[in-house]
């Protein structure tokens, strides 16, 4: 079933009017959450309705939902998302997702499409859509699914659809009626591009700033009192003797310098200091041993024999002692 569009409001087909009225709230919320800004979302919705009115004449009604949501997601206002300053709701965290996963989630929740219909809108296969939807679902830090956050986000999206402000509903209704009449953009949707136009006073101000910068740059090359070559503007080089260099005051005495020395621990060790006296000899000895040259070890000093009486258990000493004792006794005999 198709229809032929007309250029007047009363001649607009009832089916087209009913379809646009049915998707108006859901489309406004989807565009707002996808763009991050309600004004940009409403402008995108009006543009999608206008394009859909021209395309619906050649499409069967069964293809209307897929074409409308595809046109809405293709609007330039939805290609970039406005960052949320402070996230106060679960829906504000949609900005953490990429454009594809966020659109997959909003088609399922805000537009109310099935997985097959949403995959057709994005022109992807069903497994690819399910993968994008899985990435968009809330998760815990460890990767587990977070059903509480998912339910909270779903309830907030449905609440936004049902509780749009009356003034916003009036603007959306006016834009829809203008589309059905075949008129151009309404004042509300045309104000957004007009606000992006460059004010007329910016260009003169930029030229003035450029002239001031040029004057300042030229002033740096003009001599003021003293030129850069040190001639003082008179063409003669000024020469001044340098002041006498004073002897710098000592910051610490020799004792403190010794304590602050990085090798103080080794310098304060008596054994280490004695070893350093023979450092050259020990170095030569280590080099000779490393080269395989046999170096005789100097004999150690013989220790002094202790003045100890001979032990009586020694046989020689014992025999000698016995003989001397016998001789003494014989000599002393009467």
Image: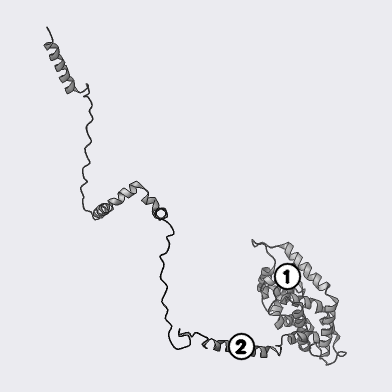
Q: Where does the image place residue 274, in percent across and percent down from the top left?
A: 31, 48
**Residue at position x 67%, y 70% from top?**
96
Element carrying mark 1: helix
Q: Quadrant of the C terminus?
A: top left
The color scheme shown is: one colour
How crowded pointer 1 is (Cα within 10 Å; few <14, some 14-19, many 20+) is rated as: some
Numbered mark located on residue 217 in the image = none
Looking at the rendered structure, which numbered label has been put on residue 92?
1
Residue 324: percent from left, percent from top: 14, 17
Would you place residue 279 above or below residue 25 in this image?
A: above
Q: Nearer the viewer, mark 2 or mark 1?
A: 2
Residue 63 appears in the picture as rendered: no
Q: Position of residue 131 (x, y in %)?
A: 66, 70
Distance in Å between CA atoms under marks 2 and 1? 45 Å
- Residue 83, quarter of picture: bottom right
Q: Which residue is mark 2?
A: 212
Q: Residue furthest right?
A: 10
Q: Where residue 200 appears, x then y in whole percent?
A: 71, 90
- What residue is rendered at 80% in x and 84% in y? 188
How many residues crowd around disc 2 within 10 Å: few (fewer than 14), some, or many (20 or more)? few
Report the side of 140 relative to 181 (left or right): left
| Furthest residue in direction bottom, as rendered | 7
């Amino acid at each position: 079933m198709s229809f032929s569009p007309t250029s007047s409001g009363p001649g607009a087909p009832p089916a087209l009017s009913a379809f646009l009225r049915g998707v108006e709230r859901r489309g406004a919320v989807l565009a707002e959450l996808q763009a991050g800004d309600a004004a940009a979302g409403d402008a995108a919705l009006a543009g999608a309705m206008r394009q859909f009115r021209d395309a619906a004449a050649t499409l069967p009604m069964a293809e209307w939902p897929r074409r409308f949501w595809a046109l809405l997601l293709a609007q330039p206002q939805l290609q970039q998302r406005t960052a949320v300053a402070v996230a106060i709701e679960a829906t504000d965290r949609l900005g953490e997702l990429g454009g594809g996963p966020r659109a997959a989630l909003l088609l399922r929740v805000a537009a109310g499409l099935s997985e097959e219909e949403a995959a057709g809108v994005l022109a992807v296969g069903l497994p690819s859509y399910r993968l994008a939807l899985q990435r968009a679902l809330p998760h815990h830090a460890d990767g587990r699914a977070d059903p509480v956050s998912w339910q909270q986000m779903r309830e907030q999206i449905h609440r936004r659809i049902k509780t749009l402000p009356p003034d916003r509903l009036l603007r959306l209704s006016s834009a829809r009626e203008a589309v059905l009449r075949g008129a151009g953009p309404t004042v509300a949707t045309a104000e957004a591009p007009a606000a992006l136009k460059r004010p007329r006073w910016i260009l003169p101000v930029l030229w003035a700033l450029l002239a001031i910068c040029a004057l300042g740059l030229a002033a740096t090359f003009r001599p003021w009192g003293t030129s850069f070559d040190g001639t003082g503007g008179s063409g003669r080089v000024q020469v001044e003797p340098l002041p006498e260099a004073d002897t710098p005051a000592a910051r610490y005495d020799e004792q403190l310098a010794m304590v602050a020395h990085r090798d103080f621990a080794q310098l304060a060790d008596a054994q280490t200091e004695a070893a350093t006296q023979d450092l050259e000899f020990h170095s030569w000895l280590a080099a000779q041993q490393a080269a395989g040259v046999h170096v005789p070890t100097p004999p150690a000093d013989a220790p002094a024999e202790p003045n100890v009486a001979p032990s009586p258990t020694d046989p020689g000493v014992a025999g000698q002692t016995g003989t001397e004792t016998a001789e003494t006794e014989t000599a002393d005999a009467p």
